Image (tube, helix red, strand yellow):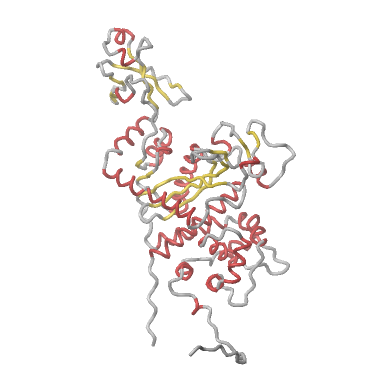
Amino acid sequence: MMGERRVDQGALFYEFSLDRHVPADHLLRRIDRFVELGELRARLGPFYSSMGRPSIDPELLIRMLLVGYCFGVRSERRLCEEVHLNLAYRWFCRLGLDGNVPDHSTFSKNRHGRFRESNLLRHLFETAVRRCIEEGLVGGEGFAVDASLIKAEASRQKGVEGSQGLPSALTSRAIEEYLAVLDHAAFGAATEVTPKFISPADPAARWTGAHGGQAFFAYSDNYLIDLEHAVIVDVEPSTAVRQAEVTAAKTMIGRAEERLGLYPERLAGDSAYGSAAMLDWLVHERGIEPHIPVFDKSKRADDTFSRGDFAYDAKADTYRCPGGKRLTTTGTVVNDDTTLLYRASKQDCQACALKPQCCPNTPARKVPRSIFEGARDLARAIAKTEAYALSRRQRKKVEMLFAHLKRILRLDRLRLRGPTGAHDEFLLAATAQNLRKLAKLVPSPEPSAAT
């Protein structure tokens, strides 16, 4: 028999528990165990006035931002709507059924003010990393470093020629930040090459065609991860050039040791981090094994002997050519004080039967050797080991994190402008990824038996 809905008089009292309506396996319930905001109010206290009306609770704003980044809700206006309607979001944000959701403009006011002045988002990220360490998810023996391009909130059609510079009449927060980082090693000072185009909306974003398709304005999101469970131990924004990414890697390694007490034995990375100076920094200044391909352009295109065909004798500080003759150096450093030249005797080269394969267009052969070549040789030796092969496989975890960042968290394009905007978004996204990692790998406590 077909049923009929009967409209009875409504009950005078309802019993409704928001907690009971959030499933035990819901992502937010599993994440909530690891959200530690106990120090938040004390940290922000000096940045609030002691007079006036009470502000929106900063814990509510942080919890809402975590919801947005965990579930890929990029628009703060839409985030407010979702929190208003979704029971699980309300439960996580401690709003209850009738709590008021703040206006979306509140986020902007706090972000540009108290949150940045107190470096709150960095503190939030490092708190999540420390929790990962406490739960045994960070081994600390091996790290990997990589960078991924994230499109800036800047139209590629509205860029101006880099050689012309920005119109002097333009003023904005993004332009002020651009001028502030002109001498920063991870931004303006990373390269002397003038970009083809500059965005008036976000001048610090770099014009790049690194993806091989249409060029666009972008920032580099730099990750330093622990290879044990792919926990992000540090994150740093930089301009989208290789030199800036190397600088960011050094910053993250130093900060992980200083603030988290993490000091790896080995570092995995791609050839972008295999420059002579970077390898020397790892080996001689930090004592870290570089599990990194050497960035080497010594191979000659004309099929004549390359530097690798010459054997180096470290004790005698000489090279020996394929014909058995010695090449020596005067010790004079050239090429920005980074290269030594080893020269063969003109008499030896003129009488050598291998001259057409060695130096057909010069009287004698010379071989350049970086002053950092010792670190490069160590990296080449490590590349022949099983440990290196393992590091190469493990390094793919950081690539998966970037794929997760763009596909699940939907951070394939920034919403905020300027270096500080990139800084805020990258920190929040990395915090969300680590919280999701904790929720996945740390089992929930068993419910206590009813008495």
Picture coordinates of residue 376, whole percent (x, y): 35, 33
Position of 385 relative to 116 (above/below)? above
User: Which residue is painted at 49% across and 37% down in the image?
Assistant: 243
User: Which residue is painted at 54% across and 89% down in the image?
Assistant: 4
Position of 108 relative to 202 (above/below)? below
Choose between 349 and 128: the one closer to the eye.
349
Outermost front residue: 1
- Left or right for 47, reference 392: right
User: Which residue is painted at 49% across and 66% down in the image?
Assistant: 35
Picture coordinates of residue 309, whole percent (x, y): 29, 23
Choose between 333 and 170: the one closer to the eye.
170
- Left or right for 20, reference 363: right
Picture coordinates of residue 414, whole percent (x, y): 57, 51
Quadrant assignment for the C terminus: bottom left
Choose between 80 and 335: the one closer to the eye.
80
Outermost right residue: 169
Q: Total label count?
A: 0
Picture coordinates of residue 203, whole percent (x, y): 63, 41
